Image (cartoon, grey):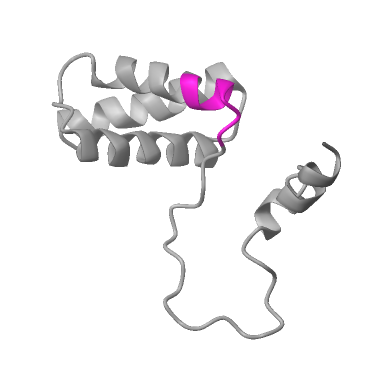
Amino acid sequence: MDLIEKTRDAAILRLARDLEVDVGKAERWCEAWQRFAKRRGVAWSPYFWDSARGWIDAQRSMRNHVGSVVRPSTEAAPAEAEPASWHVRRAGLPHRAERLQGE
């Protein structure tokens, strides 16, 4: 196991402990950070995972939710499939139309 993998594993465990979430969710947050950092050209450094923690905390404070790392299927969805906003309703958040009605 190389140094990058070791530091990533340590960051996942530390994040799971500090945020009191399961390891799977902590790993998804770390993968989301890695994708974000790669898009932005963030260099790997001794502070890479410290930066990750700041980014994750900011995302959580904005109530952003980490998605699954599994890519969605490219197959067409069946007609009876749930609408694209199903995840909002399942999370207990009002649908956009419901929020607009309340205004």
Query: Is 52 placed above or below 92 here?
Result: above
The residue drawn where x is 49% and y is 33% is: 26
Q: 72 or 11: nearer the eye?
A: 72
Residue 88 seen from this side: yes
Work out which quarter of the rendered image holds the N terminus and state it. top left
Residue furthest to the right in view is 102
> Does residue 72 appear to the left or right of 18 in the view shown?
left
Query: Is 73 placed above or below 23 here?
Result: below
The residue drawn where x is 71% and y is 49% is: 96
Position of residue 62 measured from the top left corner of the image (x, y, whole percent): 56, 25
Query: Is 72 placed above or below 1 here?
Result: below
Position of residue 9 measured from the top left corner of the image (x, y, whole percent): 34, 31
Work out which quarter of the rendered image holds the C terminus and state it. top right
Position of residue 18 measured from the top left corner of the image (x, y, whole percent): 54, 16
The residue drawn where x is 22% and y is 40% is: 39
The residue drawn where x is 45% and y is 26% is: 13
Q: 83 or 3: nearer the eye?
A: 83
Q: Quadrant of residue 91?
A: top right
> Does residue 90 appear to the left or right of 7 in the view shown?
right
Query: Is 40 placed above or below 86 here?
Result: above
Position of residue 31 measured from the top left corner of the image (x, y, whole percent): 36, 40
Q: Quadrant of residue 20?
A: top right
> Does residue 95 appear to the left or right of 58 in the view shown?
right
Residue 92 seen from this side: no
Boundaries of the magenta span: 58-64
Residue 61 shown in magenta = yes
Q: Quadrant of residue 33?
A: top left
